[in-house]
Image (tube, rainbow, N blue to C red):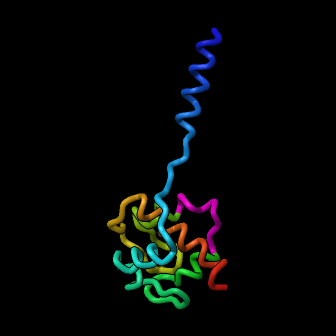
Amino acid sequence: MLRILLFLALLASFSCERKEVPRMSPAEIKELVGVKGCPYCHDMRRQLLGPSFLDISKRYTERDRDKLVKSILEGSRGKWGDNSMPPQKLTEEEARLIVEWILNLKHELD
């Protein structure tokens, strides 16, 4: 019985592991943002077709991380007015890096 309980505890610990996001410097992530074309619609401080990165950072918290990743990967509509954002061609890891970078802007730019 004890072996079964230990096995179940070990199995549960594997399923609760958090996905590690590769480490990149803020400058490298900003370069990724540029390469992926985000600045065509988003500026650091002013609204273009989409909201500024700083406005996004101020509206959302760390708890919204997965929601933002989903919005980037699947697109979104109606969160910032009538404009919509089509799905972006990024890996989930790239989207997570960009979201972390955006969420940290409120601490760096404000």
The answer to which quarter of the image holds residue 84 is: bottom left
- Left or right: residue 90 versus residue 58 is left
Q: Residue at x 51, y 74 (%)?
A: 26
Q: Residue at x 45, y 73 (%)?
A: 29
Residue 47: image location, x then y, percent:
51, 89
Q: Residue at x 50, y 52 (%)?
A: 20
**Which image quadrant: the N terminus?**
top right
Residue 52 in magenta stretch = no
Characterize the magenta stretch by its predominant secondary structure: helix
Residue placed most toward the observer, 26 or 46: 26
Residue placed most toward the observer, 88 or 12: 12
Numbered range of the magenta stretch: 59-67
Residue 22: image location, x then y, percent:
46, 58
Residue 66: image location, x then y, percent:
53, 58
Q: In this figure, what is the number of numbered marks?
A: 0
**Which image quadrant: the C terminus?**
bottom right
